[in-house]
Image: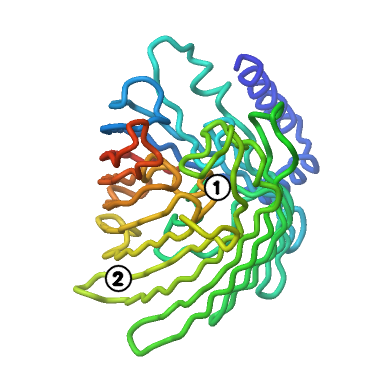
Amino acid sequence: MKKIVLSTVAAATLATALTASGAEEVASSESSFLDRIHFKGDMRLRYESIESDDYKTEVGDKNKYRTRYRLRVFTDIDLADNLLLETAIISGRDNPTSGNVTFRDDEPWSDYFVDVLELKILDIAYTFDHSTVKAGKQAYMMYRPIKSQLVWDNDLLLEGVNYNYTDDTKMLTVGVNQLHRRENEATSTGDINLFLAQYVHAIKLESSTLNIGAGFYYYDGIKGNSEPYAAGALGNTLVSGLYANDYHILEGFGELKFKDVFGKPFAIAAGVAYNTAVDDNNFGYDIGVQLGKAQDIGDWQVKYSYTDIEEDAVFAAHSDSDNFGGGSAAKGHAIRTKYKFSEHVDIAGTFFFNTLYASRCATGIESDYERVQLDAIIKF
């Protein structure tokens, strides 16, 4: 941290000296370069409670009450026309679906704002016509109806080459990626690759838009391999600590969006996921409705969804990391609310009322799982 501060001070001093000496060409060059750099970010402060009858993947007390934060700083650099370098430093090292860091009394300051930070996005994006090609560590470009997390968690990042085409009537995404292992390297039996394809067609109706989509996500190398992340299998079937199945996931969904219902935008959606690589416990679905959109100051939104995911319907390490405590082998309700308090501050609350499958519980019987998240999101 001291080195970072000293380097910043030195850079500022040098810039001041150049300006004072009348180095107009250097200043002009620097100004031109700075115009091509774009910053944005956010910090989310969260109070969270978790209460469960039996949740075997939680460490320690099954009931948890904690405060957390997530920090993200995005930097985009225009390298040339239509060519962009995208980077992001995000908290939550070694977790592919969450940037959350839990505050604890016995940890030094550096553990919260230095050691937990990681360069999670580093890619080159090339845009042309209606197309975008990204190569490197990147945010995925698949479409999710009302931001459903049945297959993909909000924060999941990919590592590979991906292509997206979007116009007024359709959207196509294809890609080749590899899971980057941060844990369990010693027990890994090989690489895990992900080949993906998704198509969405938009139909304009008189007062609404209907989006119909399908996708296929082929994971290669999971069966017989170890868990790639520290979070664990999160509901997927294991045998002797290794995955018992492959995951070749077929997704389908429909979404109907209205611009004005009771003076607010309204959307309803349903989606299914089916793992074609196994015969049992391979189906999941999600239905949701949302009223409002927290876009301008004073706006609010509320979303309700019901999700039911069998053990091997999806690759659990990549699906929603909050609902059920993350993963599969569970079902239940989620209520998500958000209010636009000011230009740079959102206030949100999320409430989960779930039932965990017996296969996921130490007692061998279904158990209740309830989770509350209260957030303040500061944007800059």
Residue 84 location, quadrant:
bottom right
Q: Which residue is under mark 1?
A: 156
Residue 145 point in image, percent of width and height? 43, 66
Residue 83 location, quadrant:
bottom right
Whether 270 is drawn above or below 327: the answer is: below
Residue 216 point in image, percent of width and height? 60, 66
Residue at the (36%, 48%) spot, across then down: 330
Residue 374 point in image, percent of width and height? 28, 38
Farthest residue toward the left? 262
Q: Is residue 335 left or right of residue 72?
A: left
Badge 2: residue crowd in 10 Å (few <14, some 14–19, many ≥20): some
Q: Earlier in the sequence, mark 1 or mark 2?
A: 1
Give the camera-side residue of 210 and 272. Answer: 272
Task: Report the amino acid beneath label 2.
Answer: Pro
Residue at the (69%, 26%) spot, across then down: 11
Q: Which residue is under mark 2?
A: 265
Residues at marks 1 and 2, CA–CA distance in whole angstroms: 27 Å
Residue at the (67%, 54%) spot, across then down: 194
Badge 1: residue crowd in 10 Å (few <14, some 14–19, many ≥20): some
Residue 238 location, quadrant:
top right
Farthest residue toward the bottom? 206
Residue 4 point in image, percent of width and height? 64, 21
